[in-house]
Image (cartoon, rainbow, N blue to C red):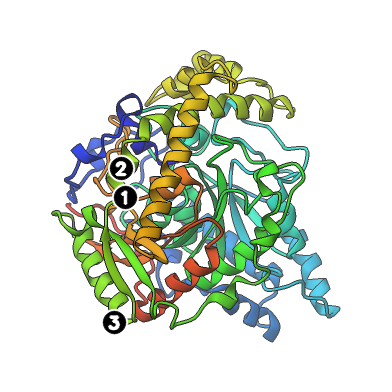
Amino acid sequence: MNRRLFLLNGSLAGAALTTLSLAQCTSNSAPTAQPPTDPTAASPAAGPDAFPLLEATVADLQQHMQAGRHSARALCELYLQRIEAVNAKGPTLRAVIETNPEALKIADALDAERKAGKVRGPLHGIPILIKDNIDTGDQMQTTAGSLALAGHRAKQDAFIVKQLRAAGAVVLGKTNLSEWANFRSTRATSGWSSRGGQTKNPYILDRTPSGSSAGSGSAAAASLCAVAIGTETDGSVVSPSSVNGLVGLKPTVGLLSRTGIIPISATQDTAGPMARTVRDAALLLAALTGEDPADAATRGSAAHAAPDYTRFLDTNALKGKRLGVEKSHLTGTSDAVALLQKALAVLKAQGATIVEINVAKPVAALGDAEFQVLLYEFKDGVNKYLAGTNAGVKTLADVIAFDKANAAKAMPFFQQETLEAAEKTEGLGSAKYQAALARSQGGTRKILDKIMHDNQLAAIIGITTGPAGCIDLVNGDYSSGLDFSSPAAMAGYPHLTVPMGQAQHLPVGLSFVGPAWSEGLLLGLGYAYEQATKLRQAPEMRGPLVG
């Protein structure tokens, strides 16, 4: 979740924070509980020539295995070595919270299948990292980064994990995240959890990895895996993808099952792929889809899902398309504005027609209603999730009590006022909740649908988020004034972000937002833009901009 949208007790404050400092920011952060490290002293494995799988695509890895250059086991071993070199040592990204002790055994079994002539599909033998709020019925924990859930092992795989395993993927480990998916405090710091510590941005190490899927973003960007999975309520797939130079897709709510994922919101939550290319995101998305009897939102989704999303990837996909660009993103002092202007020139050169629209301001007016919806749904969802686990805490109230009893370790930098506000809600039958839901989800859908209809748009575009801000454990996150996650998140519509370039070595993404079930269309548009620009750059794990 993009907690920055709910500063000041749920009010949108981003508009007042329009200047993003690109100066040194390490000195603004409180010391972490981990041993200090020199951010410029990256391990040799971080070098662009030292890691043989740097920036490798799924297709690259399949070619390695088909040609016998690497086995699935060898790929896993290389990624595990990479994790050891740059996650726990060197730049200490802290993007991976735990590795899977069964990964090599699983890879061996998949290698045996390949040797016997069975290849399950494009993900066969591919090492994948998933966010630590997604259940795995194995030796790994599922904790949402919270010490209150330390030691909790799920009884079974989440539905999407079952889909991954069936597709032949190797779940290599779990990624760190903003604790409770960034829904614990209005002063939280993205990428920090009491269990995993502070995840770093691999482009500039004292910059935020953003959003609650911070570990998935940092890990995929730094080639700690082939592809990764994040989850989003509002911004937590697209924002970390944007600031980590990735392709990220938040699907239509209901395309992917949420069963076995620690929830925030039944109306906005969804998992989504995070990858270094549009094609890899498309491959991963297809493997995750499926109707789940335990998640009513997925009922009928098979009619909208594609067994192969790569069929939408066309370099001419932008030709003849009308795209609405968020007008407020066309002016301002942020370097991201200049990147957007360059992107518009590319889109036009590829045959698209650009129309200026205004969607951010009317949707922002519904932000307070959204926050109320999330408070109500978080309590309801977390209580249901915990009740079905073997965790020591069984309710949200138990979590709050645990954090208070263990405040020195659980809350060393910020508190849990968001959890406490959620605990005070009176249930989903409340008239206040129902009114907020109608205003948030219903109101946002009307705004988007009308703009797209009136302007005959294929998609809406804008700056996903500004360049990554400083990690600040004293004051928490701050906004660049450029956040485009809410319209699609509140409506439950799909949102794709694709690398748009860099500002002072910090990546910025271009957003494509479409109507429900338009994932294929968005992937096609994003692919055409990606292939025309090829702006993704591998991170260099730089120290602060100012010495």
Q: Residue at x 27, y 49 (%)?
A: 482
**Disc 1 packing (10 Å; few <14; some 14–19; many ≥20):** many
Q: Position of residue 73 (x, y in %)?
A: 70, 68
Badge 1 marks a residue whose secondary structure is loop
Q: Which residue is mark 1?
A: 359
Q: Residue at x 52, y 20 (%)?
A: 431
User: Any mark on residue 349, and which?
Assistant: 3
Q: Give the quadrant of residue 470.
A: top left
Is 153 located above or below residue 484 in the figure?
above
In the image, farthest residue toward the right: 116
Is 497 located above or below residue 361 in the figure?
below
Which of the two marks, 3 or 2, is nearer to us in this view? Answer: 2
Which comes before the other along the chain, label 3 or label 1? Answer: 3
Badge 2 marks a residue whose secondary structure is helix
In this rendered view, identify the residue nearer to me: 513 or 420. 513
Q: Position of residue 189 (x, y in %)?
A: 37, 36
Residue 102 falls left or right of residue 53: right
Q: Which residue is mark 2?
A: 362
- How far, Cα to Cα, is label 3 from label 2? 30 Å
In this rendered view, identify the residue nearer to me: 88 or 390. 390
Q: Give the quadrant of residue 517.
A: bottom right
Badge 3 marks a residue whose secondary structure is helix
In the image, farthest residue toward the bottom: 67
Q: Give the quadrant of residue 119.
A: bottom right
Q: Position of residue 41 (x, y in %)?
A: 34, 56
Q: Is residue 144 visible?
A: yes
**Disc 3 packing (10 Å; few <14; some 14–19; many ≥20):** few
Q: Which kind of residue does numbered mark 1 sit on?
A: Val
Which of the two marks, 3 or 1, is nearer to us in this view? Answer: 1
